[in-house]
Amino acid sequence: MVMELMSFQKLFQMTKVINSQFELSEILQVFVDAIAGEITQADLVGFFLKQPDGTFKGYKGNKLPVDITELLIDPKEDEFVRDILRNQSSDYISDTSIDLRLDQSKRQLLKIKSILGIPVIVDNEVFGLVFVHDFGKPMNITPEQMEVTEAFVNMASVAIRNIRMFEQRQLLMEKQQLLLDATKALSESLSVKDVLNTFFYYMRKASGSKDIGIHLYNEKEHTIEPYQLSSENVTMDEWKVKHREVKLTIENDRLLYEVITEKKAAAIEDVYADPRPNHKAFVSFDIKSIMVFPLVAKGSVYGVVAIPSIGKQRKYEASILEFCQSISDATATALSNAQHTETLDHSVHERSIELQQANFKLEGLVRELEHLNELKSDFIATLSHELRTPITAVKGSVDILGKGILGDLNDSQKDLLDIAAKSIDRLLDQVNELLDFAKMENGKFELLYTEADFNEIVKESVHIVQSLINKKKLILVVETEVDKDTVVRVDKQRILQILLNLLSNAIKFTPPLGVITIKTKFEDSLLTVEVQDNGIGIPFEKQKNIFTKFYQANNQINGTGLGLAISKQLIELHGGRIWFESSEGQGSAFKFTLPIGKE
Ligand code: ADP
């Protein structure tokens, strides 16, 4: 059959209109009008949209002054419609008084004599139905009219499919954007409060619900505890009180058990028809339907989000569930991080208060110790000072006796007095050391600078120890590189004291026949003195303590353990430095420097 030019033009025009429209209702109007324009003898052209319950509701009509949206076609009561749906193809009744398949009440109401029914099929499913009929006078549709109408229907289904795809894509894009916005906002929410606000804002949008509750899961007790709520139906307090009455656990609510153990969201349209949820709890909250999402952080579920439908049932599409789950997932990590940071901040704060208190105590303790130390040094100073007078007196008496001024002495008397004199000297030295130490500790020690010939100081020290050297059969070598008549500005007595300290240690710790060497050098205004011996040396592990006061490395009886500590202080007061090298069984070398010219 050949389609007339006129019909082609109509088709072409309709294509143009359809392509410029994106509104379903407008396209359907154009479509219905086009059919009416083609089948001019018809009294009504109507498009009926399929409803979720399987009925067809009037949507767009043409011609008759009938409000088509009032019309509902139920296939159960209409065999004609059932045939069209079963065959998925158009059908035509030319005389309704002979062909009785049509719903008779509709037939009478609209005075239908003949009727054409065409299914609009989109994606292999009936999307809607088009009816073309008369009002009391048969239409006698021509085959050509039939053909053109079918072409319109095909075009309409393509257009509808496009719109649907477009709408779906639009919806998807909107969702993606929302998810993107939510993720960004969550990443910028640092406090728990911020995270919760952001979550509730986006979850309300995503779920289309105003009732959203976050519950925390207590892993130890298996309980589900109310945490935060966003609702217009219940207050936070009411919510918590009800929860306390019901006491949800994963044992008394299998739905929560599944969500938590399987880490998977769940949605239930009719909660009372499902055996899993705790019905008692749902009755108390008047929940009819519910969605539940797990909050997972670091691989484990620490809470659940519940989005109930209160008072009326709700059907959930898979896409909603998926979308809300995405928001929950993004929130879970942000919330757990924020909670973690806040507890951390809190404990850092607590620790620093504790630390402050401890510091405070410690400061008090330090002050007390300082005071005690001062008392101790004062005591030592007073004591050694007090000791010096009687010792000096005894020394004087012993000297007088020893010299035989008060009468001749026999040999054993002389020997005894000799021993007494030496002991008194040693005692005096030690008392003097203690006195120096106490003064240094109290910061009351002062140097007495004078001009002195350096080589003379060395010579004097050698002179003093000479008898000890001889007695122990040691060899003392002096290697001086300091020019004759080198005058230095130092506390002469103290430098002598240092030299004597180092020399007497060398003598003390070197076995008979050993060698002690004194080396001196003056270079770049720096005087270097070295006292070397080949004695017993200092064990490596004891070397670090050698300058510590009262420290003795070899359990000797003589000495106070103060000599080196005092020498170090004296050298440092002069602006110099002391150090040593020693190896056990080989000997030691103590060296010190004195910057000359500075005071
Ligand atoms: P002390 O009065 O006991 O000699 P010092 O402070 O002078 O105290 O010396 C501290 C310790 O260092 C000594 O007891 C000794 O063990 C060790 N010491 C010092 N000089 C020498 C040395 N030349 N050889 C071996 N050990 C030494």
Image (tube, rainbow, N blue to C red):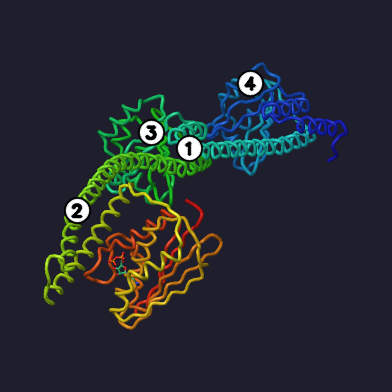
Q: Does the residue tagged 4 have its C-beta within 8 Å of any atom of ligand 1?
A: no
Closest to the observer, 36 or 410: 410
**Quadrant assignment for the N terminus:** top right
Tell me the residue that label 4 is attached to: 111
Dot 4, crowdedness within 10 Å: few (<14), some or many (≥20)? some
Q: For the residues carrying marks 1 and 3, which lies nearer the camera in this image? A: 1
Q: Nearer the viewer, residue 460 or 6?
A: 460
Q: Are marks 4 and 1 in contact (CB under 8 Å)?
A: no
Give the residue pinned by disc 3: 228
Quadrant field for ligand 1: bottom left
- Judging by the rendered image, the residue that carries numbered circle 1 is 190
Residue 271 image point, x, y percent:
37, 38
Question: Which comes before the other along the chain, label 2 or label 4?
Answer: 4
Q: CA distance from mark 4 to mark 1?
A: 71 Å
Residue 67 on image: x %, y %: 62, 18
The amino acid type found where label 1 is placed reads Leu
